[in-house]
Image: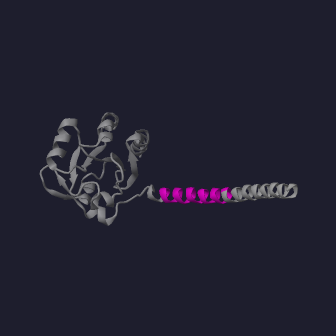
Amino acid sequence: MLFKLSFLKKTKTENRNQIVYFNFVTMKKMKNIFALLVILTSISCSKSNAQKTAFSKEALSETLLDLNDKQVAFKTILDENKGKNMVIEVWASWCGDCVKAMPKLKELQATHPNTNYVFISMDKTADKWKAGIEKHQLKGSHYMANDQMKGVFAKAIDVDWIPRYIIIDKTGKIALYRAIETDFEQINTVLNQLEKQ
């Protein structure tokens, strides 16, 4: 009986060692897999957050609704603003973050009065869009996407969050492709740099 008991103790100890070793190896493999996932995610995010310098043909050919209920090509809007720096804000009247960012935007407009401001709404109806412009007293040029956030135009300019800001320089090149409401310091810095050119 004593022999059996000591054998069992030895076996339990060996089993514990094997389990500990197995857990150690498994954890090491898991750490490697986790590290690989982090690297792949960061590469994926960096590609999706890449700063473009020009709009796609698809984006340029899309039309937007103006305040006179006429369709205007996005390319035409860009061409009309050439020669001046431009801030494009993609927003919606229902968007809480958009409303929260408006005081900062108005500060930006006061700091950079020679910059053109173009607002592109993702509202579902023209009535809500126009009421939002009036309610928030947004100064600038106004357009509405025909197919909201999940539509062709929003996808063509990579809208994944609003408010979204795009800065275009005097030559029509994109100076800042993706900025959100927390990036006003960066937006201001880019505009300051463009004004020195």
Query: Considering depth in this image, is 186 or 147 the residue closer to the camera?
Result: 147
Please provide the residue range marked out in magenta: 27-46
Give residue 24's position: percent from left, percent from top: 71, 56
- Name the quadrant containing residue 77: bottom left
**Which image quarter holds the N terminus?**
bottom right
For the point 87% across and 58% down, the residue is 3
| Left or right: 152 in relation to 29 | left
- Residue found 20% across the figure and 51% down from its top: 124
- Whether the magenta-drawn stretch holds residue 38 is answered as yes
Left or right relative to 119: residue 56: right
In this rendering, does residue 85 appear at all? Answer: no
Looking at the image, which is closer to me, 12 or 169?
A: 12
Q: Quadrant of residue 74?
A: bottom left
Percent position of residue 82, x then y:
29, 53
Residue drawn at 26 percent across, 47 percent down = 118
Name the residue located 79 percent from the left edge and 54 percent from the top edge.
Answer: 13
Please give left or right for residue 192 compared with residue 90 in the image. right
- Quadrant position of residue 56: bottom left
What sort of colour scheme is used for the picture?
Answer: one colour
Residue situated in front as seen by the camera: 11 or 195:
11
Q: Vertical placement of 57 versus 17: above or below?
A: below
- Magenta-span inclusion, residue 185: no
- The image shows residue 51 at horizontal and vertical percentages of 44, 55
